[in-house]
Image (cartoon, rainbow, N blue to C red):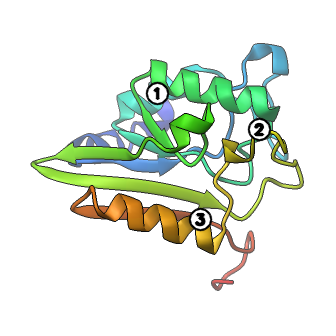
Amino acid sequence: DFAPFFAEVRSLLRSADLAAGNLETTLGGPRKGYRGYPSFNSPDSLAEALRDAGFDLLFTANNHCLDSGASGLVRTLHTLASADLCSTGTFVAEASRDIPCIVERGGIAVGFLAYTYGTNGIPVPSDRPWLVNLLDETLVSADVAALRKETDLLVVAFHFGNEYARHPS
């Protein structure tokens, strides 16, 4: 039960017009074994707790997105969708990468994109390069140009930097 973890911020998240966060774990299922650092896999109940806390959207492109392998990444996305949470940055199919993540609030269309510097040395499957949005200037530029045409506001999340650093890298 992850609900108590959000008790202190639930009212803030729920009062927001739109709340987005970074899901830096996988929901790869119990067969993969629940575990923490350095290779994360969390119970499905986390998705429900995030939704109930007030999150609308989760960025999934980060260094831990493949911690449960490609099948765990896909399962994570299905679990988030089942909990009515939008996500972007990782994708179940090549065609789904081309479906823009747009949320409308108060007549304003907000587009979301997410990218990561890497996956902690776990290679993105060569037959599925679209599975994870890796930081690539050409890709980011093309995605921004395409989504900008469809939205009033565009949010681009980059997952990068040196852990535990006191200053930006």
Query: Which residue is under mark 3?
Result: 139
Amino acid on which disc 2 is placed: Phe
Disc 3, SS: helix
**Farthest-out residue, left:** 107
Query: Which residue is under mark 2?
Result: 40
Of the residues under marks 2 and 1, which one precedes in the sequence?
2
Position of the N terminus by quadrant:
top right
What is the C-alpha distance between the residues marked 2 and 1?
17 Å
Q: How many marks?
A: 3
Amino acid on which disc 1 is placed: Ala
What is the C-alpha distance between the residues marked 3 and 1?
33 Å
CB within 8 Å, label 2 to label 1: no
Amino acid on which disc 3 is placed: Leu
Residue drawn at (72%, 78%) of the image: 165
Residue drawn at (89%, 55%) of the image: 121
Q: Could you say which quadrant of the image residue 76 lies in?
A: top right
Name the disc covering residue 49, or none: 1
Residue drawn at (67%, 82%) of the image: 166
Q: Could you say which quadrant of the image residue 126 lies in?
A: top right
x then y, percent, for residue 142: 50, 66
Label 3 crowding class (10 Å Cα cut-off): few <14, some 14-19, many 20+? few
Disc 1, SS: helix
CB within 8 Å, label 3 to label 2: no
x then y, percent, for residue 50: 45, 33
x then y, percent, for residue 93: 62, 32
